[in-house]
Amino acid sequence: MNQMTDFTRNEARPMLRVSGLSHRVRLETDTLTILQGVSLEINRGESVAIVGRSGSGKTTLLGLLAGLDTPSEGVVELDGAEISKLGEDERAKLRASRVGFVFQSFQLLPALSAQENVMLPLELAGIEAPEARARELLERVGLGERLNHTPRQLSGGEQQRVAIARAFASDPVILFADEPTGNLDNRTGQAVSDLLMQLNREKGTTLVMVTHDERLAARCGRQLNIEAGILTEPETAREQADQ
Amino acid sequence: MNAAQKLMSVRRDFRERDVRVVLVALIIAVATVATIALFASQLQRTLVSSASSFLAADRQLEAENGRPVPPEWLEEARSRGLETGQMIEFSTMISGPEGFELASVKAVSDEYPLVGEVEIQQQASDGAREMVASGPAPGEVWINPRLLRLLNLEIGDSLEVGNLPLKVTRLLIREPDGGFRLSSLAPRVMMHVDDVAATGAVQEGSRVEYIYLFAGAEDALDGYYQWLEPKLGPSHEWEGVREGETLSRSFDRAERFLLLGGSLAVLLAAVAVAVASRQYALAQRDTVALLKTLGLQGRGIGRLYLRRLALWGIAGIVGGLLVALPLFRVLVALLSEALERPVEVYLDPSALLPALLTAVVSLFAFAYPPIRRLRRVPAMRVLRAQPGETGRAALPDLFIALLAIFGLVWLYAGELVLVGALLGGLALLLGVLGLFGLVLMAVLRRVNGGGNAWRLAFVGLYRHRQASLAQLAVFAMTIMLAATLILVRTSLLSDWQTQLPEDAPNHFLINIAPDAVEQVDAFWADRGAPLENLYPMVRGRMTELNGQPVKEAVSKDERINALNRELNLTWMEQLPEDNEIVRGRWFDASDTEGVSVEADLAERLGLELGDRLTFTIGSAEITEPVVSIRTVQWDSMKPNFYVVFPPEGGLVNMPATWITSFYLPEQKKFALNDFSREFPTVSVLEIDHIIGRIQDIVQQVTQAIETILALILAAALVVMAAVVSATLRDRQREGALIRTLGGRQSLLVRSTMLEFALLGLIAGVLGVLAAEAAVYVLQARMFDGSFRWHWQVILTLPLVSALLLALFGRWQLRTVLTVSPMLLLRRLE
Ligand SMILES: Nc1ncnc2c1ncn2[C@@H]1O[C@H](COP(=O)(O)OP(=O)(O)O)[C@@H](O)[C@H]1O
Ligand SMILES: [Mg+2]
């Protein structure tokens, strides 16, 4: 137990290590293989884009990397903890302190104001003075004037900025983003991704982003391709990574 | 307040539609159950006390042998903490300055009445009446207004009872115990017991009854009776309110109805809570997935929702009681109005227990299971909608729910028949519904879409088939439960109506000599108040059963009033309409032997057909076999008999007098004066006051029943609203889409209304039929009424439910029609 929940940071280790990851789901008549033999390593502070067509398995992979789901096969090691072996609650605990998320559909709670949405992970992680910190973060993403507005009163771009503020609120070591601009128009998307990359750089967070937008992917330090559940890394990118 | 707290805050929570439905359902359930339980216990207490006042005490001991009981008997009672009182009843001549009349005298001690009040009038001229808790003082006499007129007296004048002059100080309007005693003769004179000796009217051997009154705690009374019983002689009769009590018999069924109503409220609320909380849980899945993603653990989620549930429970209980208590007050006020006397509010705390239990069980058995499963919502849901849970996951819930319903209703109604009928009806309904759904869907699948409203409606039903079937099930169940209640209420009320119609007999004539029968009959026929059936009456005692003394033949602790006194025996040719043979056969013209025995008495004596009963009549003894056992409507206000002989049977040549009952309207009561003059030996028993009182109470209980019915129908509407709102979002989105895609509004409206009307019609038909099935069982087993089809309800209810649902559907569409599709789609994102 102790061993499993001991998530002491090991600076030498990669932030994320995946090997032999496969994911299958059982359908009514047969089984569908969504991911097959995925292995990869992501170092601390790296920003990685996973690019692929719709339906190629990106979201599934992201969910497994972040410990939202457990794989059919293979090992996922996040910040030194083998999350594929942890129970639900232990994974939740890990997420509360170390992992941030940005979603395509924002996933703000409609009942809460912008500020309260940002406060939520702070409270769950037991961080002091969540209100002040949430305000600070919302000011940082340019929504200092909209603290008390509910998601319904905000535009898509604004909602996503709240979500970004929330993602960084608990100072995660790693941030997962699933098509963060997928629901936004080009210019808004551009602005949101600017904000995301900027904050990421400032905080030195490791970023794993899934997208089918090549331009957004290009802004990450490293790109991975996924096709029909098989992950490939372009030569150039791997050489860069190896250096 | 922090965000997590705020997220779970009561105020925010209560703004959600599903939570409101759960709350309203809980409030209605708690309110209904609490109101019913409180009122039932109030009614019980009030009726027992008003029944006690029929005796002017809790118990009476009558000595019919014309001798007082030993004084030690009364001392013993007082030493056991009982209140005692005494009355002496006898007939004698009363003389005034202008003549004399035979009167029935009741002499009472200072304590009289121990329970209840005497209604009097101070002056003959002005009709103001008042209630007093005592009888006349020594030297005074209170008399019936009729006697005042007969003797041409004024208040303040003197009259003589036997040898003793007494001053008339009040008019006696009504005595609490003036009820059903057949020996009481009209007109009545009431005087003080201490004056009796001086009248000289009561002598050894004269016909006089000594009656002793007792009041006190139930266990003290029981203890005293145990002490007393071995000392009682054959002419002593111990009377309590429990036996032969007309009122409580009438209200047995009212109470059962109330219980039925309460059970239905519980069932309906359970369905509403279950549906709404499932809906709520489904809507909460995204929140839970997000909270998990943000790191909240399963335990934390469980705690969050349990806290919520607890808050709902508290809100439901508090809200329900806030509704129940004033409602209960109103019902008590109505009761007091009906009884024409103040009723002490009796707030029985234990009556609140079922309400609390209902709230708690509803929450934990119906609301909690779907919410509990929220813990299992995969965090992955934040990234992609997960396949919805299968129906199988909800199966254990269904099992728990059924068990809980069964337990609740059983605990609440305490009637296995009730639980069986309701749950059986429901199960039958669901079974038929399942089959029906399969067939319906197979048919609907064939219908092609198209621009026609009918087709769209059919396609709509098919497209939402899961929701449609679920709605169908809930609607049909709701309609069944509501219809059951309406049907039982209707037949209950009509039973009462037939049992105590406006012109129910309200006077008895007793002691009619055989040769006067024809004249008496003619007397009343001439005055437009014809007599009902006339019965001969022979007084006799049941002494032996199959050759054994009957008191030995039955177990000691059975107290059978019929054995403690002379029975009224009769003969008749035709079985009275409201009697029913349960075993054996009714006499035919050739029968010269045999008796027919009342069913309760037969059961308590353990009588079988063919058992031989011996009766002592005067000095004669006759023995007859039991040839039939028969039920009697004791509350019919007609002469009723435990034992009936055939016309040419054992009672031939026995000394008989005749008895009859008839309806005499208030404005013809003066004719009683002439009657008493013309037939001085015939006793008149006036029960019009009592009948009026019972009718008042019936009316009041009817009002209570209607109130509760309204509450329950409200619960039914809540259930329907809960279910319809479950598909609201889908429908609104669809409506918006149809409009976006260019569908005409009128088409959308018509097809939606048709779709709902179809649902309503089908649910209505199935629900009503299931209700008939349940009512069939209930009528036969619980309300001992006869079953008949209720065509009106069968035909109208489905139409009403179709119409209601169509309107409901139309109402749901309102936003879809008025708001721009753009806005809607965005809002429904
Ligand atoms: N639980 C599931 N059941 C059935 N099919 C699934 C499930 N999860 C994912 N899929 C399928 O797996 C493929 C990959 O899905 P996803 O990871 O969402 O792809 P992407 O995010 O790249 O569009 C899709 O074809 C999707 O339909
Ligand atoms: Mg995806």
Image: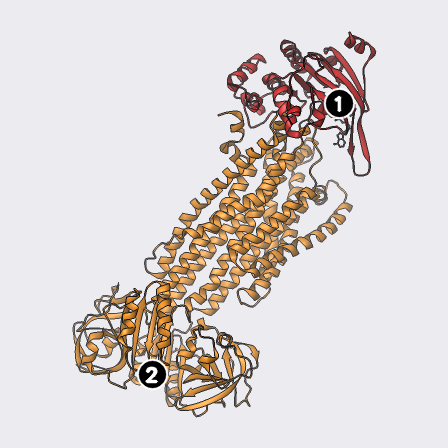
Quarter of the image where one finds residue A83: top right
As shown in the figure, which amino acid type bears the numbered disc 2?
A: Val
Q: Nearer the viewer, residue B738 or A109?
A: A109
Find numbered disc 2 in the image and state the secondary structure of the residue it sits on: loop
So how many labels did they put on this image?
A: 2
- The one nearer the camera, B407 or B34, is B407
Camera-side mark, 2 or 1: 1
Q: The residue under label 1 is which amino acid type?
A: Lys
Q: Which mark is residue B641?
A: none
Residue at image point 42% right, 82% down: B568
Give residue A58's mark: 1
Quarter of the picture containing the C terminus of chain A is top right
Question: CA–CA distance between discs 2 and 1?
Answer: 105 Å
Instruction: Pick whichever, B730 or B191, lies toward us.
Output: B191
Residue at 49% across / 77% down in the picture? B605
Residue depicted at x 47% and y 60%: B255
Q: What kind of colouring is applied to the model shown? A: by chain
Q: Which mark is residue B682?
A: 2
Q: Is residue B304 above or below residue A123?
A: below
Q: Residue at x 67, y 33 (%)?
A: B739
| Parent chain of label 1 | A
Query: Is B166 situated above or below A55?
Result: below
Chain letter for the red part: A
The image quadrant that residue A121 belongs to is top right
Q: Residue A232 in the image: state x and y as whole percent.
A: 82, 17
Residue B2 placement, left or right of B228: right
Q: Residues within 10 Å of mark 2 (few under 14, many from 20)?
A: many
> Residue B172's x, y, as percent?
26, 70
Which quadrant of the picture is home to ligand 1? top right
Position of residue B807 measured from the top left corner of the image (x, y, whole percent): 59, 45
Quarter of the image where one finds residue A182: top right
Is disc 1's CB within 8 Å of ligand 1? yes
